[in-house]
DNA sequence: GACCCTAAAAATGAATGCAAAAATCCCGTA
DNA sequence: TACGGGATTTTTGCATTCATTTTTAGGGTC
């Protein structure tokens, strides 16, 4: 706890549940969440001081976290001028989706063969919940479930490197939702695509699943691009 | 300069040529090079003190660099027990190559359409130099040129996100060369594959180039896996 | 010698301090 | 009022310091 003489024990209660994680490790996830949520607008300076207060840490671990976030593409470090929230640049959407398409394909190819029945069952549950959220018009929930759907599918690939990279890309793309908010518009279409994804997964047909995922990705990208013109 | 009262100006001459880069930014690249080169054996503790002396920096920027390298997968942070060079685990080779295959495919699909004639010419030059190095038996040079060949091809995709991720994966895989040293054995075969890659690139046939790259990747992975049994 | 316990030493993680750079403010001039 | 420009404040990057934890060393017991 900066500026105070509190011991580590006294500070402990402030940390997240994951007790063995380092201060800096938690910070990366928490600050990334702030950036992805849009709580800090893109392009604005990252207020080191404020964040230090907010998380009750000194500048050292905070700056460590910022370096990691910069490597991930959420933050831009400007020498001697501090860090800013990575500006949202429409020109970045295309390469992001293009990159994601490669990952989606690999997820399809591998998950079709490696997903456990339990995992497929879990995905179907999320799929149903997605439908319910759409009917209710609860787009916030819909969005969260949609994120989980794809994240779980990625996890079914059993490839940790793929899963991790996919997650970063998903979050980077997710930052652009303010520009478009495609979910409200594309909800039904998206749900139908998910339907086919589930079917291909159940059938365990790698190429088919890969194509469904690529198609879904492409349609999402198109919806976003269209909203920009 | 730790432990001394030297001013920043006086320290400046110690930095690399890229004057506007931060201390930490240089460190990431330099330490990664040390890890990829194998100068620090895998699994060994990273000697903060030594590295601080070597690069004439304090622990603060050094530790910032280690956090980034941990996020990239070159280093493992153990809470309260320091950082170690990420252990080489044969079980990691498969997911690494699998992930790379997805990137190779995308590189093929995009580079075939986006590579400039100049870039293709540059690749052909490297290809010829590769041949010369193979004939000379200069495997160190061969290896360097091979790295550049694929790196340049990735760059021809004009997708910065792809290029960056590809580079990290390539370096992570490169660490396993000590286990195998596949290049000496697979030199000729690899050269023939490059030949076809160049042809497909010249022809600007996306699917063909993608398949050639995936095949090349798969053969490399197989050679590595075979050497492990 | 093997085992275990304790104490000194070293390393780690994070807070604080400090010099340089940047941003802001203030005021004079046109 | 618009526009410098120089002093002041803030921020930044890094070095240093400090509290804990871990590791190592030493010594007693069996």
Image (cartoon, coloured by chain):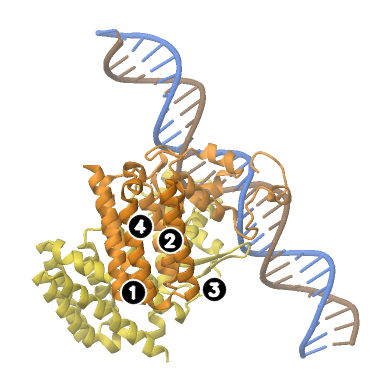
Chain colours: A yellow, B orange, C brown, D blue
What number is the disc on residue A44? Answer: 3
Residue at which label 1 appears? B109
| Residue in view at x 25 percent, y 71 percent | A105
Q: Secondary structure at mark 4?
A: helix
Q: Nearer the viewer, mark 4 or mark 3?
A: 4
What number is the disc on residue B191? Answer: 4
For the residues tagged 2 and 3, is the chain the same? no
What number is the disc on residue B127? Answer: 2
- Residues packed near mark 2 inside 10 Å, few (<14), some (14 to 19) or many (20 plus): many
What is the x, y in percent for residue A79? 61, 62
Rounded to the nearest angstrom, the CA distance separating label 4 from label 2 is: 8 Å
- Residues packed near mark 4 inside 10 Å, few (<14), some (14 to 19) or many (20 plus): some
For the residues tagged 4 and 2, is the chain the same? yes
Examine the rendered structure and indicate whether residue A51 appears above or below residue B57: below
What is the x, y in percent for residue A157? 21, 62
> Closer to the N terminus: mark 4 or mark 2?
2
Rounded to the nearest angstrom, the CA distance separating label 1 from label 2 is: 20 Å
Quarter-wise, where is residue A193 in the image?
Answer: bottom left
Q: Chain of mark 2?
A: B
């Amino acid at each position: 706890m900066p500026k105070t003489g509190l011991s580590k024990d006294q500070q402990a209660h402030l940390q997240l549940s994951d007790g063995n994680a380092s201060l800096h490790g938690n910070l990366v996830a928490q600050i990334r969440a702030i950036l992805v949520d849009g709580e800090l607008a893109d392009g604005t300076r990252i207020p080191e001081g404020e964040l230090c207060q907010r998380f009750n840490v000194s500048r050292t671990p905070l700056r460590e976290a910022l370096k990691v976030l910069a490597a991930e593409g959420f933050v831009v470090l400007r020498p001697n001028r501090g860090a800013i929230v990575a500006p949202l640049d429409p020109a970045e959407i295309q390469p992001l989706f293009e990159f994601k398409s490669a990952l989606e394909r690999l997820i399809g190819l591998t998950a079709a063969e490696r997903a456990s029945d339990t995992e497929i069952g879990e995905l179907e549950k999320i799929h149903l919940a997605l439908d319910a959220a759409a009917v209710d018009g609860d787009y916030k929930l819909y969005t969260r479930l949609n994120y989980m759907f794809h994240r779980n599918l990625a996890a079914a690939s059993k490839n940790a490197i793929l899963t991790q990279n996919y997650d970063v890309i998903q979050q980077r793309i997710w930052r652009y939702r303010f520009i478009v908010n495609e979910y409200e518009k594309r909800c039904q279409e998206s749900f139908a695509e998910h339907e086919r994804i589930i079917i291909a997964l159940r059938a365990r047909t790698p190429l088919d699943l890969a194509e469904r995922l690529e198609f879904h990705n492409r349609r999402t990208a198109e919806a976003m691009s269209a909203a920009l013109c």
